[in-house]
Image (cartoon, helix red, strand yellow):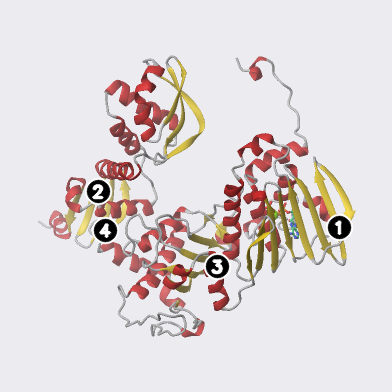
Amino acid sequence: MHALTKTRRTIKRLSTQLANQIAAGEVVERPASVIKELLENSLDAGATQIDIDIQAGGTQSIRIRDNGSGIPQDELALALSPHATSKISSLDDLINVVSMGFRGEALASIASVSELILTSHHQDMAWSIKAKEGQFDLTPASHPRGTTVEVNNLFYNTPARRKFLKAERTEYRHIEDVVKRIALARFDVAFNFRHNQRQVFSLAAATSNENKLQRLTRLINKEFIQAAVQLNFENAGLKLSGWLATGEYSRSQSDMQYFFVNGRMIRDKVITHAVRQAFQDTLYPGRFPVYVLQLEMDAEQVDVNVHPTKHEVRFRQSRLIHDFLFYSLREALSQETGINSGEDIKHASTFNSKTYPASFNSGQINSTHKTFVSESNAAYSSSHYQNLARNNELSKPLGIAIAKLKNNYLLAQNQNGLLVIELAQSRKRLTQQQLDTALSEKNKLISKPVLIPFNLKIKINAQAWLDKANKKLQQLGFEFAVLGENEIMVRQVPAMLNATDNKECINNYVDSILNNGIDFKSALIEIIVNENFSNDPTDWNMLLRELENTGLDNIKHCYHQISDNDLSNWFTK
Ligand SMILES: Nc1ncnc2c1ncn2[C@@H]1O[C@H](COP(=O)(O)OP(=O)(O)OP(=O)(O)O)[C@@H](O)[C@H]1O
Ligand SMILES: [Mg+2]
């Protein structure tokens, strides 16, 4: 029996140090996360120059120096205390947060798992505070305007965490990635980056377009710049700017996609989907677009307080954002490639000569690069989007999805009338195809760990079954272990599984195989298809587009067209 259940322990308040260490588990995953937090603090302090100096992939030491506003002596200890921030003071501030930080937690968390020294200059005085094992030590120091944070021996007091650190090279790569992202988000700030006393890069603040292109060349590559269009769209309170490589330059992985929302690098389904859709006709399947894009909007339009590391956000108007992105990107791409474009556009092969489409407002064009500037705002009202969306999707064979009926059907509209699409058959077909493609490419499905591993009872001998079945299970992305004679533990499941209740779902899976004699792959398809289908119209339409891609002949039995004639015949006698 487990020790905790034998004798009850009394409830005690955690020490601040331990509470901070636990909180650190959320934000400080590895050296790169420390650097992200420190850089964001420097940016919030208005720094225009930031020097980053790290040793041994950041595991030995990290030093970030900025020329920002600094911290007064009497606030230094507070800066290292949990729930202490200068950035918000009320719920209203949180709704309108414009700084990168607001939780007042990063420094306290980092200080609890490292030896941290914070030195700062404020009003002609500089002080240094050292934190070790929850104790602070304040001494006078000398420091120019700004702040330096030194983080030594990260995770020295949390051996479990220290053990999870990867090789220096890997940690370094994560750091490089973070620094790159932030340098791509903030062209106005100069960055100096050194690893093991060697300079990695030194980037001057880039104000002119030429400087920006130099930074892009340094941080991404020349091919990108050669294939890139610069774009600048603004409408309905949304502003999209940046660079986008046309189909000429793409990648086999999504490693060069930089998307910032109000200066924050985020991962978001709505954005990924809009971008993917915009590129649908210009990229081969399996190729990934390359871009550096900034989306800006009022702070209150986006909730940044949904994830401890702030990698995710929630948009108040996600549909509007999706459509704005999709149409802006497609506009930029079609202008570039000449698709859908009535204009006769010549493209500059160098950055110095250029003919712009007449409809574009030349006031905002910077002539060093192919640039697309939005049409006047009026033309981009949301009804304009809706019309474009409708015309585009209506002309597709399976049209535009209008509703989900009883979780079994989609109702759609195309140019010929209405369509009913049966979900079970079509999802089965697509899942089958996705599985086959994934298996033929990699011979293995990607797996993901379950949040909390769980046990399942089975009727036959677990060891004997796994001996026989493990190879197939692993190929499909499952990781099971023997727990008892008739019990297995589930550790990993296929990444494409979206189940809300993994236990029930995997139980059904094992049951189908063992009791109903269904083969491993068909049983997997079954559990995937049995999951409730999304309620998000974006996903509905994605399904329709994917179905079209498989070829209409292959899915004849999955949908039914009701023509306008059929409809009117129903009602005329
Ligand atoms: N480089 C810096 N320059 C000036 N002030 C800083 C700097 N770093 C931290 N501070 C001050 O210390 C406070 C605490 O920083 P910390 O990163 O812990 O919290 P935060 O940035 O407010 O919120 P979050 O936990 O979301 O990052 C900040 O609110 C800010 O006032
Ligand atoms: Mg912070």
Vertical placement of residue 103 versus 156, above or below:
below
Q: Residues within 10 Å of mark 1 (few under 14, many from 20)?
A: many
The residue under the point 33% across, 45% down is 441
- Decide which of tag 4 and tag 1 comes sooner along the chain: 1
Q: Amino acid under label 3?
A: Arg
Residue 278 pos. (x, y %): 37, 63
Circle 4 — which element?
A: loop
Q: Nearer the observer, disc 1 or disc 3?
A: 3
Q: Which residue is mark 2?
A: 421
Residue 362 pos. (x, y %): 47, 84
- Decide which of tag 2 and tag 4 comes sooner along the chain: 4
Label 4 to label 1: alpha-carbon separation = 66 Å
Q: Nearer the observer, disc 2 or disc 3?
A: 3
Label 2 to label 1: alpha-carbon separation = 68 Å
Q: Nearer the viewer, residue 237 or 440?
A: 440
- Decide which of tag 1 and tag 3 comes sooner along the chain: 1
**Which quadrant: the N terminus?**
top right
Q: Which residue is mark 4?
A: 399
Q: Which residue is mark 1?
A: 127
Identity of the residue furthest to the left in this view: 573
- Decide which of tag 4 and tag 3 comes sooner along the chain: 3
State which quadrant residue 472 falls in. top left
Q: Marks 2 and 3: CB-CB under 8 Å?
A: no
Can the viewer see residue 307 in this picture? no
Q: Which residue is mark 3?
A: 218
Q: Marks 1 and 3: CB-CB under 8 Å?
A: no
Q: Marks 4 and 1: CB-CB under 8 Å?
A: no
Quadrant for ligand 2 reads bottom right
Residue 296, numbered label: none
Q: Amino acid under label 1?
A: Trp
Label 4 to label 3: alpha-carbon separation = 43 Å
Vertical placement of residue 465 versus 271, above or below:
above
